[in-house]
Image (spheres, rainbow, N blue to C red):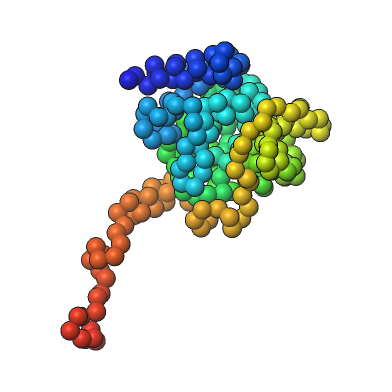
Amino acid sequence: MDPAVLREDMVDGLESEEKDVLRNEAVAVAMRDVPRHEFVEHERSAYADRDHEYLGTRVLSPSDAARVLQALAPEAGDRVLIVGAGVGYTAAVVAELVGEANVHAVDISRPLVWEARSNLAAAGYDGVLVDCRDGASGLPEYAPFDRILLEAAAVSPPRALLEQLADGGRLVYPKGAQPQRLEAVSADGETERFEAVSFDPLLVEGEQTGSVERNRMAREDREFAEKHAESRRGWELEWLEWEDSTGPRSR
């Protein structure tokens, strides 16, 4: 089926009386435009209203994506930081709302940074900046931000993120362990609470899947991916020197 039709059906379902999740017209238009199948494997299931697990992270369901984006309420021209880039889908929808050059995303997992960059480029949003960082530290080089979205649960937002909010800015995050509830914090400390949600906790250094490597340039990322794709293990490795079954190797 045509992906555009699947997107229409997905958004129509979120706006229906039965679900009544999506009420913001700008977010609805953005979600109709972003090709979600570029971020989630299997075209048809990409538009089903359910979570997906990939590379050790949870890809938000369309319902949860709509909830966090409506709470964030980004407007055209806002500078936005997304902490927990994941596979890049949320960043793409935000790019539709504010312009891709205004969207910055970080993730503590190097494999996810690579995945998000690749997905965003394939979907036409290669202007979004994605960097490998400890999310609790934010991205001070590009601060201040009008909107910050923390896509991971925390008891309270990290101080560094609050310090990177612009005057009049807004930070949205899932508050608590279990149960959780979306909460928005303004730069002046005012809070607003939204519906209940369930997110994975914010990871700190040492908890991420895989090891953290230094940030590479685009060329290095490409070369790394090519080498990884061509790597083989076990008996397939031609260069591996095996013991002679009849005796020790000759020196």
**192 or 149: which is nearer to us?**
192
> Would you place residue 218 above or below residue 61 in this image?
below
> Would you place residue 112 above or below residue 187 in this image?
below
**144 or 34: which is nearer to us?**
34
Image position of 12 (left or right of 146): left
- Residue 214 in view here: no
Residue that appears at 44% across and 17% down = 9
Q: Position of residue 185 (x, y in %)?
A: 75, 32
> Would you place residue 236 above or below residue 85 in this image?
below
Q: Position of residue 36 (x, y in %)?
A: 44, 28
Quarter-of-image position of residue 230:
bottom left
Name of the residue lying farthest toward the left? 246
Residue that appears at 59% across and 58% down = 206
Image position of 182 (left or right of 43): right
Where does the N terminus fall, quadrant-wise?
top left
Q: Position of residue 197 (x, y in %)?
A: 63, 33
Image position of 198 (left or right of 246): right
Residue that appears at 30% across and 62% down = 233
